[in-house]
Amino acid sequence: MSDLLIKNVRVLDGDPTEILIRDGRIAAIGDRLDQAGAAVEDAGGRIALPGLTEAHTHLDKSLLGYPWYHNDVGGGNLMAMIDNERQMKKRLGLDPHVQSMRHALQTASFGATLIRSHVDIDTTGGLSALEGVMETAEKLADVVEIQTVAFPQSGLMISPGTANLLDEAMKMGADLMGGLDPCGVDRDPKGHLDTIFALAEKHGKGIDIHLHERGELGAFSMEQILNRAEALGMKGMLTVSHAFCLGMPDPARVNPLLERLGALEASIMTTAPASSPAPLVKQMAEYGIRFGAGNDGIQDIWGPYGNGDMLERAKFVGLRSNLRSDAEMYMALDVCSGGGAQAMGMERRELKVGAPGDVVIVEGIAVAHAIVHHAPRKLVVKAGRVTARDGETLMTAP
Ligand SMILES: [Zn+2]
């Protein structure tokens, strides 16, 4: 943490002013602030945004730094993609620490100061992915805070030995218990959910479960998840990632689920997918559900998409939710910054006195303009320290 004065900076769409960060927090916003002892950066009239939040990704397995990967497995067959990935990771000799350093630093270079990463736990790789990502989290603690989710990517009930590995992962210090399509992958919703909720309870941690199941099947799984979270009193401790089922066009079926998620102060993480109905920004706000967004895996064996840029993701959030006005574009930004932080159980990132000193300086005429044009990042500041300049982190990736 250090003291920093950012001069000649526009707070969102405001007039040029100054932001003073002291002891890692925003101490003042205004003109002619007392800069004694603080480093000074001139933003040149550019726009300040709150630190961005990558709330759903997979740091352990991107192919950044590798030659371009030619993918033979198309979308649509989940089990084929899962099996292909487990085999290819081994064949390519991916080092989860090196890959997570590359991925996290690239994400930070775009302005993210918080990342939640699911990390594969399976009987092929064991705990090696978690070890690698936790090493990265430690090395990058001053650049980007990384949460880890112990994620049974290859299934749990269909893969004996995985439950013990998840238990070990939680002992090692994974921040959350993960899960995956209890019907679609394991075909045993009771077995899958009983196991992950028991592990979460045993270790006193929250849950972040991938739920891709659509329509009625997804709604059924969501009910099973909510039943357990309610019984255990997991207020503020439940995240459902993707939750495509909440985007289905049947309010009589969806709204009771939204009510229950809101009452639990649960979080939903979305990629704002172009290929599927999905939860929408105003719908989540209406029910008091915390809402974050992420790239999901980037440039990996699953697919070529994603780059870690959460400002670009804000554009996708806006497109998915049909957001257009300036006020609505702020909502899209918030899902990818302060709101996403809150969905991760962290303090909101926002540009006000007392908030964490995480600030991104971007080019652009206005916030909406910066979002839709993926504006270049001039400066990224984490807790008052400059961590990236002109789109490059000060720390270099291996
Ligand atoms: Zn994912």
Image (tube, rainbow, N blue to C red):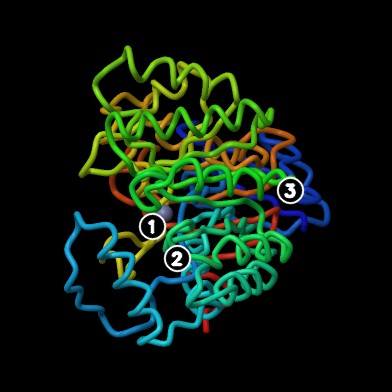
Amino acid type of the residue that numbered disc 2 sits on in the rendered structure:
Gly
Would residue 150 appear left or right of 254 to someone viewing this image?
right
Closer to the chain start, of discs 1 and 2, is: 1
Could you tell me residue 42's position as x and y percent? 58, 54
Where does label 2 land, which residue? 391
- Cβ of mark 1 under 8 A from ligand 1: no
Q: Spatial distance from mark 1 to mark 2, Cα to Cα?
A: 7 Å
Residue lying at the far top of the rendered structure? 252
Determine whether 35 is above or below 234 in the image.
below
Task: State whether residue 370 appears in this view.
Answer: no
Number of numbered labels in the structure image: 3
| Foreground disc of the pair 2, 3 | 3
Could you tell me residue 6's position as x and y percent? 63, 50
Q: Spatial distance from mark 2 to mark 3, Cα to Cα?
A: 42 Å
Where does label 3 land, which residue? 202
Q: Dot 3 lies on which element?
A: helix
- Please report contact status of discs 2 and 3: CB closer than 8 Å, yes or no: no
Q: Spatial distance from mark 1 to mark 3, Cα to Cα?
A: 45 Å
Q: Quadrant of residue 277?
A: top left
Amino acid type of the residue that numbered disc 3 sits on in the rendered structure:
Lys
Where does label 1 land, which residue? 376
Could you tell me residue 168's position as x and y percent? 68, 66
- Please report contact status of discs 1 and 2: CB closer than 8 Å, yes or no: yes
Amino acid type of the residue that numbered disc 1 sits on in the rendered structure:
Pro
